[in-house]
Image (cartoon, rainbow, N blue to C red):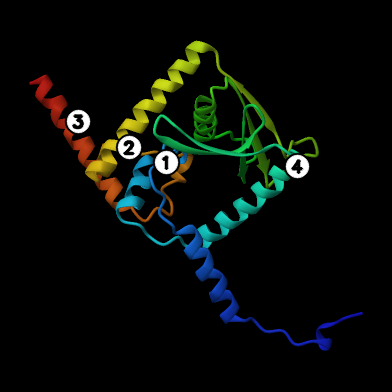
């Protein structure tokens, strides 16, 4: 039986530094054009990153790598011939995790029950892009409770009728145009903020102070407009 007495072990900072440098190189690349993922969470944060990019933190690099490996493993479970699908729709690029005649989007979460609204928006945008009125949201819960009946891999079937499809198409076009115009003008205040439940999106955002100033300014303008209307 091997014990600690049979070998020497020490932490190698050189190797650690090399790995982090390669991860930084991979996940700090600036993408060209507008992508579906730019439009589904906090568009203001995305635009700030384009205008004034900040290197990802070590924690973020860990999340990126972990997410990429999970997606690769889950993709392999769907079988041969069912693959990732990339393309462009209405001037917006997309990359669907799995396409099997309809889009399947993977998400991992530490929450035990939540289905985030931006997950649904992203899946529906993929449905628009592929002309499908059906899609699947596949979730992996990585911090389950002690309840043996809790589903660790819940899957949600999303369907749209024609009216709903047109509603989401209008939503997509509106957000695309807002983001495109704000990108051209390099003006983050022109796109909406999304903080998430408990403001989780903002917690480690390097642009939070500037964003809060934008929101304070917007509140001041609204208050002034209200006073002028009353007068």
Instruction: Give how far across and how far down residue 172 sits, in percent.
Output: 41, 27
Q: Secondary structure at mark 4?
A: helix
| Nearest to N terminus: mark 4 or mark 3 | 4
* Residue indicated by mark 2: 179
Image-based side of 87 in relation to 100, left or right: left
Q: Secondary structure at mark 1?
A: helix
* Residue indicated by mark 1: 38
Regarding residue 49, the answer to whether it shows in the image is yes
Dot 2 alpha-carbon crowd within 10 angstroms: few under 14, some 14 to 19, many 20 or more: many
| In this rendering, the label closer to the viewer, 4 or 3 | 4
Q: Are marks 4 and 2 in contact (CB under 8 Å)?
A: no
Instruction: Give how far across and how far down residue 74 sits, in percent.
Output: 70, 44
Give the Cα distance between marks 1 and 3: 27 Å
Question: Who's the residue at 48% across and 64% down the image?
Answer: 24
* Residue indicated by mark 3: 222
Quadrant (top left, top right, bottom left, bottom right) of the C terminus: top left
| Nearest to N terminus: mark 4 or mark 1 | 1
Image-based side of 29 in relation to 119, left or right: left
| Nearest to N terminus: mark 2 or mark 1 | 1
Q: Are marks 2 and 3 in contact (CB under 8 Å)?
A: no
* Quadrant housing residue 54: bottom left
Q: Secondary structure at mark 2?
A: helix
* Residue indicated by mark 4: 77
Q: Are marks 2 and 1 in contact (CB under 8 Å)?
A: yes
Question: Who's the residue at 18% across and 31% down the image?
Answer: 223
Instruction: Give how far across and how far down residue 203 sits, in percent.
Output: 43, 51
Question: Who's the residue at 92% across and 79% down the image?
Answer: 1
Question: Who's the residue at 71% across and 48% down the image?
Answer: 73
Regarding residue 191, the answer to whether it shows in the image is no
| Nearest to N terminus: mark 2 or mark 3 | 2
Give the Cα distance between marks 4 and 2: 35 Å
Give the Cα distance between marks 4 and 1: 28 Å
């Amino acid at each position: 039986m091997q014990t600690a007495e049979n070998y020497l072990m020490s932490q190698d900072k050189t190797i650690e530094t090399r790995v982090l440098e390669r991860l930084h190189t991979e996940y700090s690349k600036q993408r060209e054009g507008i992508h579906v993922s730019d439009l589904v969470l906090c568009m203001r944060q995305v635009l700030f990153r384009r205008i004034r990019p900040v290197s990802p933190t070590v924690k973020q690099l860990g999340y990126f790598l972990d997410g990429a490996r999970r997606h690769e493993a889950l993709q392999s479970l769907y079988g041969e011939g069912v693959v990732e699908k990339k393309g462009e729709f209405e001037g917006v690029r997309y990359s669907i995790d799995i396409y099997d005649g309809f889009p399947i989007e993977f998400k991992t979460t530490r929450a035990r029950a939540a289905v985030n609204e931006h997950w649904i928006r992203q899946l529906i945008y993929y449905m628009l892009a592929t002309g499908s009125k059906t899609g699947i949201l596949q979730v992996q819960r990585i911090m389950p409770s002690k309840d043996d009946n809790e589903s660790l891999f819940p899957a949600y079937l999303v369907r749209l009728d024609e009216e709903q499809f047109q509603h989401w198409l209008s939503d997509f076009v509106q957000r695309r145009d807002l983001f495109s115009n704000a990108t051209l003008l390099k003006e983050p205040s022109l796109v909406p903020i999304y903080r998430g439940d408990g403001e989780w999106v903002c917690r480690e955002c390097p642009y939070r102070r500037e964003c809060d100033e934008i929101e304070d300014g917007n509140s001041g303008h609204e208050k002034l407009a209200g006073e002028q209307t009353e007068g």
